[in-house]
Image (cartoon, rainbow, N blue to C red):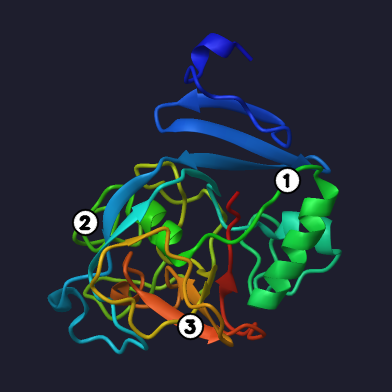
């Protein structure tokens, strides 16, 4: 691959099987048993995490979405999709998903299941140190520079997001997950950050993240509850916003819960 086509300070990590640059920035892939997963480079930056009160009015929320400034001082790689079932199957030799299609995201996995997957994947690909994104990293990447409720703007449609639009005039609900990469990507090249499946984050749950500026937050030091973000196919539009946050016990694997990889 021509070196001159890449950012001058870019050197691919040893675990990358291919790499390049396009209109959305740097990308690279991992490859396992012929299965390829693409990652996008998420640059360091500062953003407003959470949402103004009027955005979340009328929704039952388990924790506050207090708006506050977050600085992420280090860039990171984030998978362009949730982990597809065929990659999970290749690593774990099983498939817990309720919607059993190889190119759909794996679901019905707990936070602890995700940790076991990460351990095995990192052992299978030398030098890889895949992990779950923090809640702040996840929301930063989901927003992709937007301060609106969604990376697509103030509103969404079923053509953009897999969510339950049945209660909206002319809306519909697919009642299932969709194939990864089948809906439009956000401006940073990430697919299905809104809806489709909830996604585990690294962090232990905090009821309120506060209003003070923070740098590189990692969540609570300890706790039995872990953060999920993004909503799912079964959620109304208000629950698939960038700021929406929920929590489950680390061993909970019910519902449409999945995850995506960060490095």
- Residue at 23%, 70% (x, y): give it: 67
Kindly tell me whether residue 161 is visible in this rendering.
Answer: no
Which quadrant would residue 238 be assigned to in this image? bottom left
Q: Quadrant of the N terminus?
A: top right
- Residue at 41%, 46% (x, y): give it: 185
Q: Earlier in the sequence, mark 2 or mark 1?
A: 1
Which circle marks residue 247 in the picture?
3
Q: Which residue is mark 2?
A: 147
Q: Which residue is mark 1?
A: 128
Which quadrant would residue 58 be assigned to in this image? bottom left
User: Is 162 rendered above or below residue 223?
Assistant: above
Question: 10 Å neighbourhood of mark 1: few (<14), some, or many (≥20)?
Answer: some
User: Is 64 rendered above or below residue 103?
Assistant: below
User: Is 36 rendered above or below residue 116?
Assistant: above
Which callout, 3 or 1, points to the residue nearer the camera?
1
Direction from residue 113 to residue 165 in the image, left or right: left
Q: Give the spatial CA distance, label 3 vs label 2.
A: 23 Å
Direction from residue 262 to residue 127 in the image, left or right: right
Q: Earlier in the sequence, mark 3 or mark 1?
A: 1
Residue 82 image point, x, y percent? 57, 58
Residue 37 image point, x, y percent? 65, 44
Compare residues 97 and 6 and report the one nearer the observer: 6
Residue 40 image point, x, y percent? 51, 40
């Amino acid at each position: 691959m021509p070196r001159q086509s890449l950012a001058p300070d870019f050197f691919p990590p040893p675990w990358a099987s291919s790499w390049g640059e396009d209109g959305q920035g740097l990308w690279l892939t991992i490859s396992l048993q012929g299965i390829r997963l693409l990652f996008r480079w998420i640059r360091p930056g500062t953003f407003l995490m959470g949402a103004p009160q009027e955005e979340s009015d009328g929704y039952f929320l388990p924790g506050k979405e207090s708006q506050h400034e977050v600085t992420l001082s280090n860039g990171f790689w984030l998978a362009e999709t949730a982990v597809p079932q065929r990659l999970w199957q290749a690593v774990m030799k099983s498939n817990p998903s309720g919607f059993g299609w190889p190119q759909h995201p794996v679901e019905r996995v707990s936070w602890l299941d995700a940790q076991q997957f990460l351990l095995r994947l990192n052992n299978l690909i030398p030098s890889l140190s895949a992990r779950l994104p923090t809640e702040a990293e996840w929301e930063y990447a989901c927003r992709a520079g937007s301060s609106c409720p969604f990376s697509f703007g103030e509103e969404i449609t079923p053509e953009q997001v897999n969510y339950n639009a049945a209660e909206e005039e002319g809306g519909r609900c697919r009642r299932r997950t969709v194939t990864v990469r089948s809906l439009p990507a956000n401006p940073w090249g990430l697919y299905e950050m809104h809806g489709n499946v909830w996604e585990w984050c690294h962090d232990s749950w905090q009821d309120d993240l506060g209003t003070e500026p923070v740098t590189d937050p990692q969540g609570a030091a300890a706790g039995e509850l872990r953060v999920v973000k993004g909503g799912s196919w079964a959620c109304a539009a208000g629950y698939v916003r960038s700021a929406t946050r929920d929590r489950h016990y680390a061993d909970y694997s019910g519902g449409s819960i999945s995850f995506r990889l960060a490095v």
